[in-house]
Amino acid sequence: MPPVCKNKNKGYKKSEKGSLDTLSVTALKKKIRDTERFLKTNEKLSAKGQVSLERRLKACKLLLVERMAENKEKNMTSKYRMVKHFDRKKVERAIKKVQKQLNETRTFREKTELEKKLYELQIDFNYILYYPKNLKYLALHPTSGGDDEKMISKRNEIRQIIKGAMQSNDLESLNKRFKEEIKLQIVEKMMNNESLKKKENKCQERDKEIIMSNLSKTIDDDFFGSEDDIDKEEEEQL
């Protein structure tokens, strides 16, 4: 039987299957929990080892946020792929139509109006391309719910962001900007969950203390008798 190599830091597995980059969201969450537990419970860990593990923990958390953001983008892209496809086809047909009219028009007034219309269609086209991938896609030509005020307001808000990026010639930075916003949302959610867990743990500890205190008092009263019972017994003896 081959000799078994014992890890000096018992309870923590240094050897890993593959690099962090290959780990799924579930695997990363488990790794973070295991590392946090190990750091909390292992008192014999050297200062160097603790720093190394804390760095690795931070890397795992950053990668988890990145992976969760990517997954959310993929899910939303897949979910609204066909809706975006139909919107894009409609806008592309409208752009071709206006461009044809521009080539055929001769009056300055008509040309100005058509150029404005073409510009609005170009905004619509970029709205489809650069729409935030983490959000529910609000169609430009919805089949139902198109008159909902909240949807109209949100659509106009995003459309204005796209328009502003077009004017500043900064469309390519939108994807990065929206992705950073996804990450911030994920981090805030994770922090809120951790805060709730801490509160729950404190409540559980307090409840446990109350239960143990009551249990201890009950045991004392049942076994030794309450102070009133003891006083009565002493009176009877006298």
Image (cartoon, helix red, strand yellow):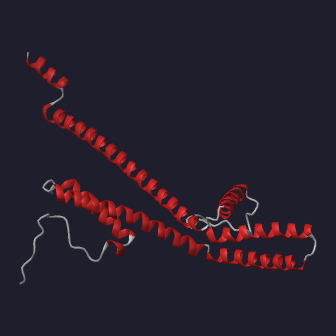
Question: 36 left or right of 232?
Answer: right
The quadrant of the rendering that contains the N terminus is bottom left
Figure quadrant of residue 172: bottom right
Figure quadrant of residue 6: bottom left
Q: Position of residue 156 (x, y in %)?
A: 71, 59
The reply to whether residue 47 is in sight is: yes
Please tell me which residue is depicted at 39% across the width and 48% down the height of the picture.
195
Relative to residue 92, is residue 127 depicted above or below? above
Please tell me which residue is depicted at 17% across the width and 35% down the height of the picture.
222
User: Which residue in the rendered view is the most extreme toward the top?
Assistant: 238
Please tell me which residue is depicted at 67% across the width and 78% down the height of the picture.
85
Q: Position of residue 101 (x, y in %)?
A: 87, 77
The quadrant of the rendering that contains the C terminus is top left
Frontmost residue, 112 versus 73: 112
Q: Looking at the image, how many numbered discs can be counted on the residues?
A: 0
Question: 109 left or right of 196?
Answer: right
Relative to residue 224, is residue 176 depicted above or below? below
Question: 224 left or right of 175?
Answer: left
Frontmost residue, 219 versus 71: 71
The reply to whether residue 33 is in sight is: no
Frontmost residue, 238 versus 230: 230
User: Which residue in the rendered view is the most extreme toward the right?
Assistant: 107
Q: Position of residue 61 (x, y in %)?
A: 36, 61
